[in-house]
Amino acid sequence: MKPVLIVGAGPVGLTTALALAFYRVPFMLFEEDGSLSRDTKAGTILTRTLEAFRRYGVADDVLKASLRVDEIGDIERSSGKMRPSVETALLRDDTRYPFVVNLPQHHLEPILHRAIERRAPGATYLRHRVERFVQEADGVTATFDTPLGQRTFEGSYLLACDGGRSTIRGALNIAIEGETLSARTFLADVRADLDVATPRDYPYLAYFADPAEWMVLVRQPHCWRFLFPLTGDADEPTRQQLADKVRAFVGAVGDVEILNTISYRIHHRIASTWRVGRVFLMGDAAHLITPMWALGLNTGILDAISLPWRLAWVTRGWADDELLDGYGHEQYLVAAKGSGEMAEAARRYMLGEQGGVETMSGDRWANAMTRTMLGVRLDVGQNGEWSMVRTAQGRLCVGDRIPDAEVHCSEGRSVRLHQLVDDTFLCLHFADPRRRPALPANRPGLRHLLVSRRDAPFDSGLRHRSLLDVGDTLRARLGCSIDTTVLIRPDDHVAAILPMTSAIDPVHDRIVRPVRRDVQTSGACP
């Protein structure tokens, strides 16, 4: 099998490489610089990203280096009044990571790269700048400029993770939609004692709204991070001015050491096309979104959740090439109509402008689901049924991410649903094992399990294929009736909800080719 060629070793490229390694798809990772980025960039990793890191085998390493946060504060800067916080602890029944974490991007990238080196030694090529590529019927040939001269590599697919100024996107003449504002955001990493000498009881992640000058305060493992706006023509502050500004933000403090600074424009720019043949755009190459509310890096990781399993299924011969088209359709909506608009709404909210932010309404659980990216409903059926915002806790719908709920396997131990979905489609059949329902045979990439509050009798022939749902907790949480089948994709999203009597034959078709609009609507939410 020809390797998948990944261009760009930022967080999205690195995570995509780990995903391909997880799915046993060979890859080669190329980076034009001589080392990973050392710039001060994104600093908050949301819960959905942590779930991806768990699947790809790096969550523990990331968590060891991170500061965990169970409250996202919302403070009116002028008065110091606390508005309702986002309390991630409310999600404890939906995920094994009911928190977000603070970790600077330049600390995250080495963790991801070390994991790649353990899984695929020598698969990373630094100081390799892509110059051109040619698509063929069975692959892509790419030429790179290297310290040893030009080198050419053959691959099955080419993934452009090469940033907002993507060379690959430019070579394909893909148009960019959206705008870049004149306003800028300034980021400063600061070492100051806000704990002991001059204690400040701020949440580790707090947003200070103010019409004149909003501020975001992030407690990183090694420092405090301040983010605030700059007008388009303003000079960047000097280090002394920064130190004075820190004191103006948080009050009198002792010594203030400025560690790193960076400024960036406010963007909402989306590529019009995300796939051209065997070439795919990912991360900033596909969508450049200002990382307000941590919607920059984390939206890119959603791409690294969506595309790799599709490539695995197609390269294994388990699905048609059409399956790959769903990546661009689903993720475009999330980036263009979801994250991008939410980031701009958040910026306006911080300025105190009218109009409100949809994610700040609704119940507290729904707010937490939205802000941690657990509430994204994908347009699986390509019929417009999708949402970035979770408005309330309700029944499961096609396109929803299934909760990472706890059930009990036949061996007696508890197991999480997302673990059962790792590297497979999973059919959950909610039925009474005492009635001996017929389960379809498992196939490569498709597993069938029965779920019930009744433990499967030993003479039922179903015990090794059954999950115990104590008290019908999972079925009630999903809002499913008895004799219902729920088909879950390898990315944890629901592909279909069907009566068991109609589920046996259609299920396999829904895997090997995209779900058709005329048959997917069972279980879809209005």
Image (cartoon, rainbow, N blue to C red):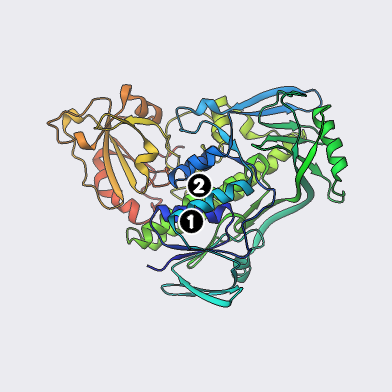
Q: Position of residue 472 (x, y in %)?
A: 32, 24
In this figure, which residue is indicated by the disc labeled 1? 117
The residue sitting at 87% across, 49% down in the picture is: 235
Q: Identify the residue at image location x=38%, y=50%.
A: 518
Of residues 392 and 319, the one drawn nearer to the viewer in this rendering: 319
Is residue 377 visible in this depiction of the protein? no
Relative vertical location of residue 134 with respect to residue 49 in this rendering, above or below: below
Q: Reply above or below: 189 against 443.
A: above
Q: CA distance from mark 1 to mark 2?
A: 41 Å
User: What element does badge 1 sit on?
Assistant: helix
The answer to whether residue 337 is above or below residue 321 is above
Looking at the image, can residue 48 be seen? yes
Q: Nearer the viewer, mark 1 or mark 2?
A: 1
Amino acid type for the residue under numbered disc 1: Glu
**Left or right: 93, with 38 as reference point:** left
Give the vertical position of 225 relative to 393 (above or below): below
Q: Classify residue 475 by image quadrant.
A: top left
Identified at 86% across, 36% down, the residue is: 244
Residue 485 picture location, percent across and down: 30, 38
- Is 11 in front, or is 324? 11
Q: Check contact, mark 1 vs mark 2: CB within 8 A.
A: no
- Looking at the image, residue 387 sits to the left or right of residue 118; the answer is right
Is residue 525 toward the left or the right of residue 67 in the image? left
Q: Position of residue 489 (x, y in %)?
A: 38, 46
Q: Amino acid at mark 2?
A: Gly
Residue assigned mark 2: 384
- Crowding near the residue tagged with mark 2, few <14, some 14–19, many ≥20 C-alpha atoms within 10 Å: few
Q: Residues within 10 Å of mark 1 (few under 14, many from 20)?
A: few
